[in-house]
Amino acid sequence: MNIAETLRGSRGAASGEARARHAPRGMAVQLMVAALVVLGVFLLVRALTGSTTQSGTAQNGAAHSSVAATQAMNGMAGMSAGAPVYTATVVGAARVDVTVTPAKVGANTIALAMVDNRTVPHRFTAAKQLSVTATLPQKQIGPLSLHVQPTEPGRYQATGAVLNAPGLWKLKITYRTPDGRQAKGTVRVPIS
């Protein structure tokens, strides 16, 4: 072996050692890039499926299946433990996230957070009037008009909402914009 081969071999070994030393950093960068790609794809899909027409009719079917999935996850656990129930629906140009606490027979707090589907994650603040009614179709109760108050822009709350029987309650959400347009949506929440 001559000197040139020896030098090439030692440089190759040295560069191999350097690669080995930097491998964890390279792996971390690759993992971070992969995570960012996955997040980007998720946000893109979310933005594309979150866009809606003015009436929101096309989105209501998808939102109701989302509600069904949420209820499947929360349903029995929420009914047995009285834990808060979280669900969502699309109402016109807004996605409405609904939380019912404690989701038991009696007085409940119903919190609504409205997000503008056109400019996610910005709050939807175009609702001039918001109303919520509750019905329990299985027991022919309602509609009960719930007293909803704004807590901050795009957020509303009904405190002391009396849901007086167990079952799958239907909350009908209606809002009116300053130009007179109206949008309606419905969520179902299990009350134990």
Image (cartoon, grey):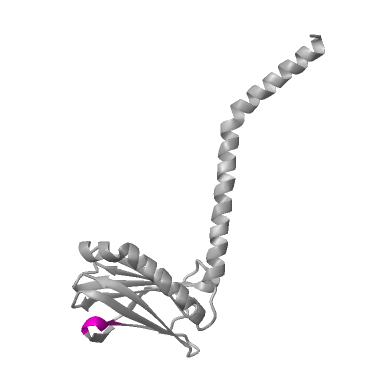
Residue 103 image offset from top left, x and y in percent: 24, 69
Q: Is residue 1 above or below residue 45?
A: above
Q: Is residue 48 left or right of residue 123?
A: right
- Where on the picture, by quarter, is residue 96? bottom left
Q: Name the residue at 37% across, 66% down.
A: 70
Q: Residue at x 69, y 23 (%)?
A: 15
* Image spot of residue 184 (x, y percent): 42, 84
In the rendered image, the quadrant that contains the N terminus is top right
Q: Along the horizontal axis of the image, is 69 left or right of 158?
A: right
Q: Report if residue 125 is visible in the image.
A: no
Front residue of 37 and 71: 71
Q: Quick check: is 136 in the magenta stretch?
A: yes
Residue placed at 37% from the left, 70% from the top?
A: 68
Residue 9 on image: x %, y %: 73, 16
Residue at the outermost bottom position: 180
* Residue 108 visible to the viewer: yes
- Please report the bounds of the magenta region as a residue range: 134-139
